[in-house]
Image: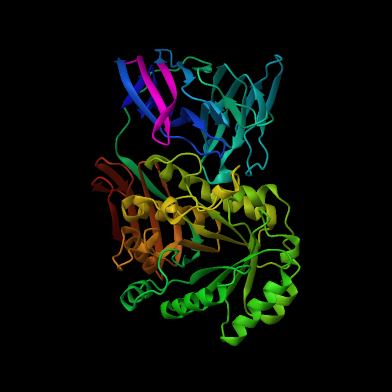
Amino acid sequence: MILHAGPVQMLYESGFLRYITYGETEILRMIYFALRDENWATLSLQTEQEVTDIQADHFTIEYDAYHEKDGRRIFQWRVSISGFADGSLEFMIRGRALTDLLKNRAGFCILHPISAARQPCKILHPTGAVSKSFFPDQVDPVNPFKLIRGFQWEAGGRWYSLDFEGDLFETEDQRNWSDASFKTFCTPLSLPFPVKLHTGETVFQKVQFKPLETLAALRTPDPTIKIRSTHRRFPTPRIGTGASTEIGSLDPETLAVLRSLQLDHYRIDLNLSRPAWEAEGLREYQNSVSLGCSPYFALHLTAPCLHQIERFIGFCHSHRIRPQYILLLSEDHPVTSPDALSCLPVIRSAFTEAKTGAGTDFNFTEINRHRMETSGLDFVSFSVNPQVHAFDDRTLIENTGSLEELVLSAKHKFGANMGIHISPITLRMRRNPNATDPEKRNFTNQQKTDPRQKTFLGAAYALGSLKRLALGGCEAVTLYQSAGNQGLLSAEGEAYPVFHALKTWLGSCGELIETLSSQPLILDALLLDKEGRKKLILINYANTTQVAEFEGALFTLSPHEIRTLDCP
């Protein structure tokens, strides 16, 4: 539902406010609240008893909401949201614990879009002091703004403010987890967590948003989405896929379908401390040969590493395996350990043609926050998924927008000539490095499976991600898995939409020509050039019909349509 507070427009969805805009300027990405448990899991929210009063330039919404865990209600909220004709907003929540529970967070989060990067801001502290600063340019490894009672910032040449009641707030750079936002949240991380809430204990918070100058009324915008080319050209990354964690040997029909993609590599994860890794490694290597892909070995190591590396070298030599890529990962460190990196000379001597890399099997935040020696490496790698903090369809598409900046920040940190690999991209988290309970660290296949893998969203997220990674200068991408519920194909070899989207990309790209969309979260475009033959891929992210204009031509796209067009 589209709401208006005077000339300020926003989307009301599932109890929260999104895309708070004035004209073409996105002021805030989202205002919402959350309950996160002791393992940082975000508990789903159910709303009920909603009452609304929606007018042309103001509104009031009230509702009840609750969180469930293990099939029973554990926390409830009473919520009030108001928008006023001067463009201001008030969002108030009153919560109560229905049972004893552990929480790491209970309350508001406010998202600023990444267009805020490099923009000036002021932080109002509880002491009354005011700090002047800027939203960070490179992805910030530490939280840039702390002890916040109020916040002022510039967007589109105008200043806006937030005032908070009920808790202190802090801002983190969510690009660390591949979110396309900066998040201002409660409670400061300097305070101990988790915290036990006892039955009947309450939470009260209020957020007030307002423009700091009078906003003029605006004309109704043209609904046609404008696509234009900047004519800037970028090389595209080498694309591979990962071995399935659900299926062992791929049948000939599945192999034939996958082979038609002509993928660059096939990632094979081997935990060298486990006894059965050799049989698994040989089976997956044979899959890579059948696919015509280069073997990309991700070696999960535990200290001391040298003996494990020597066994891997012996395994490869005995089976005449020539790795194209070797990624060193440490099971007992968030990033590749010094012990693992000390084995580089041995690996180089054994595999003179292989590219060797290091990094993390988790998010960018790990390589951003932990020191790692990179001399002698060919590439640095980290993984990406769009659902660390939220899980809805819009968040998936929004978070493609962070990937260009992640690659640029990695190159800034490790050197412009360092190869950056994203390995792998998945729809859901595979592992949780921050779990309080060690048994919650690794996820099951069921937990890693997202039903949207098999739908338009799985394909749209992949294409949007590949565009942003190419613009950032990414060298290689491992996308999803070969087959199964997390794959490009089903276990029976049926092609998902992402397979067809990827085939179009791989068959059309030599270079990516940058395009800009007037509403990139609704409809975006990829312009590919292969030996002078150009193809335009239009992606309608919306569940409504949209009209796009490119070089004077109009295109009407049905809901969730991906259309490929030849360009002169």
On the rendered image, what quadrant is the C terminus found in?
A: bottom left
On the rendered image, what quadrant is the N terminus found in?
A: top left
* Left or right: where 478 falls relative to 368: left
Q: What residue lies at 31% left-to-right and 52% top-to-bottom?
A: 456
Task: Note whether 469 is above or below 397 in the view shown.
Answer: below
Q: Which residues are magenta?
A: 56-81
Q: Position of residue 278 (x, y in %)?
A: 56, 76
Reply yes or no: does residue 79 show up in magenta.
yes
Residue 230 can be seen, yes or no? no
Which SS type dominates the magenta stretch?
strand
Q: What residue lies at 67% left-to-right and 43% top-to-bottom?
A: 141
Residue 454 can be seen, yes or no? yes
Q: What residue lies at 60% left-to-right and 87% top-to-bottom?
A: 318
Task: Note whether 451 is above or below 501 in the view shown.
Answer: above
Q: What residue lies at 56% left-to-right and 31% top-to-bottom?
A: 102
Residue toward you, 516 or 551: 516
Task: Note whether 235 is above or below 259 in the view shown.
Answer: above
Q: Position of residue 446 (x, y in %)?
A: 41, 53
Q: Position of residue 261 (x, y in %)?
A: 38, 71
Reply yes or no: does residue 525 show up in magenta.
no
Q: Position of residue 211 (x, y in %)?
A: 50, 18
